[in-house]
Image (tube, helix red, strand yellow):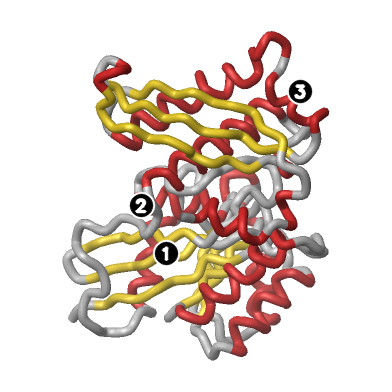
Amino acid sequence: MFRAGYVAIVGRPNVGKSTLVNTLVGTQLAAVSPKPQTSRYRILAVLHGDDFQVGLLDTPGRPAEPRVDALSRRMLRETRQALDIANLAVLVSAPRTAGDVEETLLDEIKAQNLPAIVAINKLDTVRKGNLLPVIEDYNELYSEFRDIVPVSARTGDGLDSLLERIIANLPEQEPLFDPSTLTDRSEAFLISELIREGVFAVYGDEVPYATAVEVERHVPLDPEHGDKDFIEASVYVERVSQRGIVVGKGGQALKDVGVRVRPLIEELLGRPVMLTLWARTRPRWRRDDRFLRSLED
């Protein structure tokens, strides 16, 4: 008996969807940050077992009041498309009762006639007794949830149980992916996600939502740089004033991003890296559909 399928991981911003996916697959594929709306794209992460394949579809957080721009529309579309192809939905929630966002997502799950599991994340931040009202609330909201599983994506607590329930609710069918498949994203995309995460970490609340990252050049084992991978990437902002913040005094802030992310990129690629970062201004990039598409290629 072999089970395989796509699983849409959905929820509001900052509930730990990307951390959950990264922990389950054992490597960092998606940017993670305490800042809301860190995830902007649907990312496939594949888990392989002797009798299962799980295609986890990490999706952007669903905000209560989405911005009106091309980036926000694309983020909403990523979630809908994940639900369109999924065999199962996992609604990730913080350890609190459901709100309007969860109810909206549940309506979309029902519209696709998808089986669903609730993963109540951040178990490590609350007393287990406080979870009972949350579980009861979700049971009252929708009595047909296949399961409600408390987990901590940060510590791994409860993830074995969650994965067991996910597998049990996937259809019996032949494998969907080549055994070597980990993700559908390119190295350049994964590198840009790591850099963007570094931007979120270094600059705090100053500019993160207004930044985009593009890997412009990647030369593996470049002889001109001591047989290290040479990577050149740009951090885009919308205003000249934001560019000054990104660069920092004497270029130090951007150097701090490079120092922070280079080891992560080396871990991803499995070899040493020479990383060069540039700060560039691109007005209204969040409204530029063509530019947004280029960031996914």
**Helix, strand or loop under label 2:** helix
85 left or right of 3 in image: right
Q: Position of residue 230 (x, y in %)?
A: 37, 26
Marks 1,2: beta carbons within 8 A: yes
**Percent x, y of residue 289:** 66, 61
For label 1, the SS is: strand
Q: Earlier in the sequence, mark 3 or mark 1?
A: 1
How far is mark 3 from mark 2, CA to CA? 37 Å
20 versus 241 height, above or below: below
Residue nearest the observer in this picture, 178 or 18: 178
Vertically, is 97 above or below 239? below
Nearer the observer, 287 or 122: 287
User: Mark 2 = which residue?
Assistant: 25
Q: Mark on residue 56?
A: 1
Dot 3: within a 10 Å radius of its alpha carbon, few (fewer than 14), some, or many (20 or more) residues?
Answer: some
Label whose residue precedes the other's in the sequence (3 or 2): 2
- Identify the disc placed on residue 244: 3
Dot 3 falls on a residue whose secondary structure is helix
Picture coordinates of residue 180 (x, y %)? 21, 57
Q: Counting other residues with Cα less than 10 Å from the Cα at mark 2, is it few (<14), some (14-19), or many (20 or more)?
A: some
Residue 192 higher or lower than 101, as above or below: above
From the viewer's perspective, tell me whether residue 87 is left or right of residue 284: left
Q: Is residue 188 above or below residue 42?
A: above
Q: Nearer the viewer, mark 3 or mark 1?
A: 3
Dot 1 or dot 2, earlier in sequence = 2
**Quadrant of the image occupied by residue 3:** bottom left
Quarter of image, res 234? top right
| Residue 191 located left or right of residue 220 | right
